[in-house]
Amino acid sequence: MLGVLTAFHVLVCVGLIIVVLLQTGKGTGLASVFGGGGGESVFGGKGFGSVLAKATGVLAVLFMLTSIGLSLLPKGGKARSALGTQGGRPAAEAPAGQSQGFPQGQ
């Protein structure tokens, strides 16, 4: 299940990158490199942009859902601490009266 969701998440990410790069911004954008200027005559002056905007919205929602899904799924294996404690033993504590390697004031 985790592998399938991860693969789908990667595909959504790549699709989202492509769709965002194909959109025209204030300038000509990257869409003109791939023939985006000719697409306006096929889809109408505004139609192609709205298709890309809808695709961006759908892919963004899918990206968020797969991200949440991947964060909630158990990863398997043994849970480890970020501090690297082994066997669940707490770190040794110094007595209250002693310093932790700081020089004593004179």
Image (cartoon, rainbow, N blue to C red):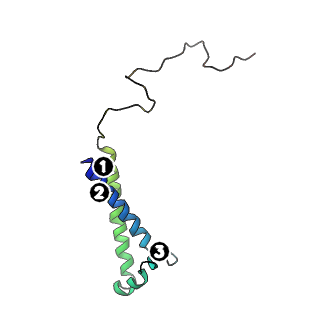
Label 1 neighbour load within 10 Å: few <14, some 14-19, many 20+? some
Horizontally, residue 27 falls left or right of residue 41, namely right
Horizontally, residue 89 falls left or right of residue 25, namely left
Residue position for label 3 = 30
Q: What percent of the width, then of the height, locates residue 8?
A: 29, 57
- Which quadrant holds residue 95? top right
Q: Is residue 48 above or below residue 103?
A: below
Horizontally, residue 93 falls left or right of residue 98, namely left
* Amino acid type, label 2: Phe
Label 3 neighbour load within 10 Å: few <14, some 14-19, many 20+? some
Q: Is residue 72 above or below residue 89?
A: below
Residue contact between numbered discs 1 and 2, judged by CB atoms under 8 Å: no
Mark 3 or mark 1, which is nearer to you? Answer: 3
Q: Residue at x 36, y 85 (%)?
A: 44
Label 2 neighbour load within 10 Å: few <14, some 14-19, many 20+? some
Rendered-image quadrant of the C terminus? top right
Residue position for label 1 = 69
The kind of secondary structure element at disc 2 is helix
Q: What percent of the width, then of the height, locates residue 100?
A: 60, 19
Mark 1 or mark 2, which is nearer to you? Answer: 2
* Amino acid type, label 3: Leu
Residue position for label 2 = 8
Number of numbered discs visible in the structure rendering: 3
- Which quadrant holds residue 60? bottom left
- How far, Cα to Cα, is label 3 from label 1? 32 Å
- How far, Cα to Cα, is label 2 from label 3? 25 Å
Q: Earlier in the sequence, mark 2 or mark 3?
A: 2
Q: Is residue 88 above or below residue 63?
A: above
